[in-house]
Image: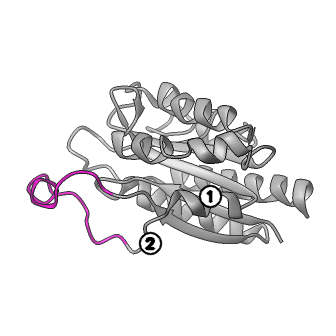
Amino acid sequence: MAKVLVLYYSSYGHIETMANAVAEGARAAGAQVDVKRVPETVPEEIAKGAHFKLDQAAPVASIADLEHYDAIVIGTGTRFGRMSSQLAAFLDQAGGLWMRGALNGKVGAAFVSTATQHGGQETTLFSIITNLLHFGMVVVGLPYSHQGQMSVDEIVGGAPYGATTIAAGDGSRQPSEIDLAGARHQGEIVAKTAAKLFG
């Protein structure tokens, strides 16, 4: 049974919701799945003032956790077209794992949220994917077997590089069923790929 970690940072809960959908898809494909989040770096009083969602159920991950999984799926909201500083600060601590090649050959994937349809979804995905490749991981995207990403009938997330959602500038839009289906599908593909490599 493949062991999958869904690792995320979510200020307002959109990526938390997507992370749980990724985990659902991976579990449905037979994987053992943990959902963890990276530490918050914003002082608590500022986070409360900005209405961050601070009651997230997922435990906080440590860098030492990462090498114990066959696959790691990483999600974050965008910050000006790249990953959040919270996620970057966490991954920047993984130099020891990189030096030892501890993640070489493991499966990696990315998912993100932006305020707008063209607000850096693909560049934010690639800011994560770049890290995954430096760690020596085998990258899994979101192929067009998730047909929902091709819809033009409504606002939809999704790219061949990973599952996405659009939150709106005020955060009022929650992940749609198409967005969540993309996240579940990516989780399923990650789990199946890890099972083939490590099963």
The residue type indicated by label 1 comes to Leu
Callout 2 amino acid: Pro
The residue segment tinted magenta is 40-56
Who comes first in sequence, dot 2 or dot 1?
2
Percent position of residue 188, x then y: 73, 58
Q: Quadrant of the C terminus?
A: bottom right
Q: Is residue 176 visible?
A: yes
Prevailing secondary structure class for the magenta stretch in the rendered image: loop
Mark 2 vs mark 1, foreground winner is 1
| Residue 142 shows up from this direction | no
**In which image quadrant can residue 4 be found?**
bottom right
| Cα distance between the residues tagged 2 and 1 | 14 Å
- Residue 129 horizontal side relative to residue 58, left or right: right
Rendered image: mark on residue 59? 2
Decide whether residue 47 is among the magenta residues: yes
Say above or below: 25 vs 86: below
Left or right: residue 60 versus residue 55 is right
Q: Residue at x 58, y 61 (%)?
A: 64
